[in-house]
Image (spheres, coloured by chain):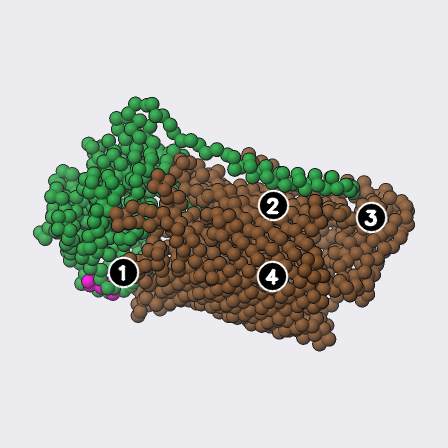
Chain colours: A brown, B green
Amino acid sequence: MQQEGSWLSINGRTVLVIWIILVTHLSVWGQSLSSLSGRVVDEEDNPIPFAYVTIDSLGLGTVTDFQGKYYIESVPQSTHNIKFRALGYKQRTESLIFNGKMERRDFMLTEDVLQLDEVVVVTAESEGRALELSTKSVQVIETREVKLQAADLGEVMAKSEGVSVQRAGGLGSNTRFALNGLSGDKVRFFYDGIPLNFTPYALGIANVPVNAIQRVEVYKGVVPIQFGADALGGAVNLASPDVHNGWGGSASYQFGSFNTHRATANINYSDDTTGLFVVAGGFFDYTDNSYKIDVAIPNEQGQLQQETVRRFHDGYKAFGSNLKVGIRDKKWANELSLESYYGSYNKETQNSQSPGLVDFPQLGIDKAVAANPFGDVLFTSFSQGLNLHYNVNPTEKWELDLKAGYNYNELVSIDTSSNLYNWHGEVVRVQNQPGEFGEEDHLITKSQSYFVRQQVGYNLSEKHSLKLAVAPTYAYRTGDDLLIEGEFDPALDDGYLLDLVSGLEYSGELMNEKLQITAFAKNYRQSIRIESVDPSIEGIQVAERSVNNYGAGTGLRHVWTSRFATKLSYEYAYRLPRQNEIFGNGQLTGRNLDLRPENSHNVNLQWTIESKITGKTEWQVQGNFFLRRVNDLIFLATNSEGFGVYDNVWSANSQGVELGGRVKDLLIKGLTLNANSTYQSYFNTSDEGPFASFRGDRIPNTPYFFANGGAEYQLEDVIQKNDRLSIFWNTRYVHPYFTGWESAGLKQYKPETPGQLTHAAGVTQKINAIKTQTALTLEVQNLTNAKVFDLYGVQRPGRAFYIKSTIQF
Amino acid sequence: MTKINTMETTKRWAWLTMLFIGMISISITSCNDDEGDTNPDGEEVETAWVIGYRVETPQGRVYYLEAHENLPSATNTSEAVELGLNSRIYSYGENPYTWNGDAATITKWEVNKSTLALSPVGIISFASTGVTGNIAEPAFVSETQAFTTSLAEGVVVEWNPTTMQITEVHEVDAFPIPEAYDGLLFEFRKEVTEDGKIIIPIETNAFPVCCTYPVDAAGARTAIFDPVTATVTYQLDNRLLGSDNSHFTDPVTGIRYCAPVYGNSFVPPYFDNAESLPSAHSLLRVNDDGTFDASYEYNLEDVLDIEFYGGTSFIYNNKVVISYVGDDYTWGSFDERFNVFSLGNFKSAVIDMETNEVSSFDALSDYDGAYSVGTIGDQTFLRAVARDTEGNQITYILEQNAIDSYTEITEHIGGNIEHFNKLW
């Protein structure tokens, strides 16, 4: 494994020197030819981003950036026709004489009313495209097409390079989301830049309705300062749909196998004259998750026999709503808005995440769950709060952005049943000791949280800017163990947590805008205070601790040609310890006030090659080499009596390559193909501690090779003019991975999460009217009814059929 | 700027990309697994030992099983059978047995007489009997009779280790769990007596709630299961606050002792009714029928300034070797009581229970703790735990040469050795 990583051992300084030499060389090389630059604007001098600017006779072209700017070089001396195209605008062609000098021209395009219904799409995609064209190490997933389909957000994100989503079942199940190998709270989640727990989507990112978002931004390893997060492995931001002048909105309803119903609705109104805007939205999810799994059921003699049964206690119900009122496009405010939200869910739990898989081919048992199911375990939660957003440019050079929020959350876990169930849903015994998961439990955890994300931007010049972000988050948590009355209750301890993540960032463009640079520094501060009542001591017991750490990072993007660009990014990142990791639980987990934050050196080298704009076939190939060198990882180290403390005991490296490609209209017009794959070597580098014996082994239970593919064929005007029929197919492959250390254990008996090869296929009929767009999708997921596991022993749903209708106006 | 302006070049790029992705997939999926150790023509080995142990992973403790002709100097995880999470390992006769706590199954393993390769030969499920989770070692009475118990549920499952079938589920009197208790109890070790009864030492969990100890939770306990009548009787002795899950038998005198459990030491410093409770640190004797010897109690506090009792290593010729923390230790709050494991100054002492002579016991001072496993053949073994300078946990199998002389036989880095035994 260390040999695999040798190419990555070149230090950052060497890479930078090589980079600068190459960039300088290329710039000198291009000076003997003409170049053309300028802006493309509309009739009100607003920039038009992502307009195509091409010289068809030479096969040259580019796309305007977010400011409408374009730049074409290496134009031979002659007269050439320059073509300008943008969705929603009339095409324009101009003839220019090139005489070996740099030419600068601005062009205006006029609106094309016939294409107006597509403009919304262009605007929506443009922000994502702008991110991709920035120095940020970000991958953007547009949901314009996938929101017509039945896949949930976890499945959508799993189609991306470097993203691994392991699900403990169907809709509503627990999810293990990993970016380049790093998972858990090493990755942070946001909705419009607001931490996800300050939204109605409290159950986690995989269960957020796709129709509630416009795009997903996946920041790999290097996290922009405005998120104010202590993310070690990256961050994911979900962007809400844009609001346009007048009435707008969307609704969707999906139903299908396992009694699954998912509905979303969103309506918005904006008056550009007064600046007033209102957004209201909501979602409702319900499923029985009654899919079939293989189980091993004992007879009276305790001999196992494999059966296929339906899950009977795995239901999920969630509801959420939000209302946002604001004013925008004023001199004193680009936006001032207030949003309230409410979200709740109930989740039945059928089994633990380690439900006792038995694989005994001699008896005809093929990976079947042998443990008794849970029939009464339930988790419920509700979350409500307010968010404020204020954005203003006090002067042309200054920008202020302020986000603040409050959240109240209650989580209830109920495991008080004495019933022992079998897989037919029958009670086979009434136990003396209640509790199906283990010990009887009825616990309420309550938390109140506040956050502020304050960002000040200053444009030093047209091409250089500074940003300062300050992001405090304050949380107060308490609870109640309802099974303990009038006694000492550790759950009643009061915990106060203040995280303060600040950052200063410089952004600039050099070398005729071909080189973009971002450099930033971050400061992480954390204060924790626990107030507990300990009946052995008089008064309230107080424990406190504070930490202060610094991190930094940079991003470089160089546009080598209009079709080839590279990005190099780096961050030294921290993940601050959690309250329970520092102070323990008052029982067998002790406190460790010396616990250090986890830290990581994160490097990405991304590249993108695109087809020429004038070509009939569009294609794009992108790749990413990544390295994560993670140290001081926290682990609960226990002794033989079960007593333990969280400690910084292990380290790991994750390095690998992602490769993806997409081609449109390759063989047949309307046919789009896409594929990507990720190979990551996430391995243990611990020199000491409990994992030292397995230095060099892959981190267990983590997928290390996975690939996705897909095809879509679109037919226009099938039923009526302006409609579109899409036939799509998606496939995913995950290579098998071990649940224990790879060097330990004989291969023939080694528990292994089997490989997955799944397919989904469907058809979408979309009908475009002047003001509305409707779509109906028929889809089958897990087409081959493959027996699929993300987590060892936890079987995922088999073949499922869904119908989904959407309307957008 | 490079021109790429033909359809062929475009296609080539696209197909090369797809091909590359496909090749990565094929090359990785085509990796062959090792075929394992095969030596079918070898001669039968004269002896066979089995060792079961665990190692830490970021997802939890994973268990392994190995078979060797002789006890090896070190475990070899690469040649072991991986059992997964939440397992237990036992052996009886010539077969190892492994408990899958998640599945509530016991798997029977066969050891090849020539190659010592392990292979599963049977599996039995207890899932519908109420026996689940962190369950204790079965009591093997014979090749055809074994008992697995869940006394909290009042269940004793009789099963046949040869056919791997349940023969009967006995509903017995459940362990009388005090209402104030959370209900956890441990019944890890079982002893089959000469008259065929099964003595089960019972450890109740360290009481989690401060600061008045429920009187009905106090007492040393054993259970005796009589296979003939299929009944369980419980013995309670109120001279000891709580008993350990293992009895210690003196190999010289043959006397069986009931030892304290470490959680007893939390009671005197924190509970306001401690003085009215039984002794936290006494040794009692247990008769062959499982009853307590009413005429014997040895209170360690009478001869030792003991603040925290860590455990009994062994009892030999009326001498007991214990690990403890002396009265120089200062307790923190109740929340911090378990810190004694990391902050306490653990010492070992040998106490002559006839003369009351106490002396430090340095023979095991290199270890954090050492506990008798018993005599296998003519060898007496201990299991000892230590940490090296880099924080790695190391477990040793020690052979006892004399009461104060030990030889390290087997070393395992990274977790506990859970079980070892000589199969033949």
Dot 4: element:
strand
Which residue is more in the foreground, A744 or B238?
A744
What mark, if any, has residue A444 been given in the picture? Answer: none
Q: Are marks 4 and 1 in contact (CB under 8 Å)?
A: no
Q: Earlier in the sequence, mark 4 or mark 1?
A: 1
Instruction: Indicate whether residue B216 is drawn in magenta.
Output: yes
Across and down, in percent, residue B109 comes to 30, 37
Read off the residue under disc 3.
A56
Rate crowding at label 2 as few (under 14), some (14 to 19) or many (20 or more) other CA atoms within 10 Å: many
Q: Chain of mark 1?
A: A
* Image position of A251 with respect to A557: above or below: below
Marks 2/3: CA–CA distance: 31 Å
Disc 3 with disc 1 on a shared chain: yes
Instruction: Indicate whether residue B286 is drawn in magenta.
Output: no
Q: Earlier in the sequence, mark 2 or mark 3?
A: 3
Amino acid at circle 3: Asp
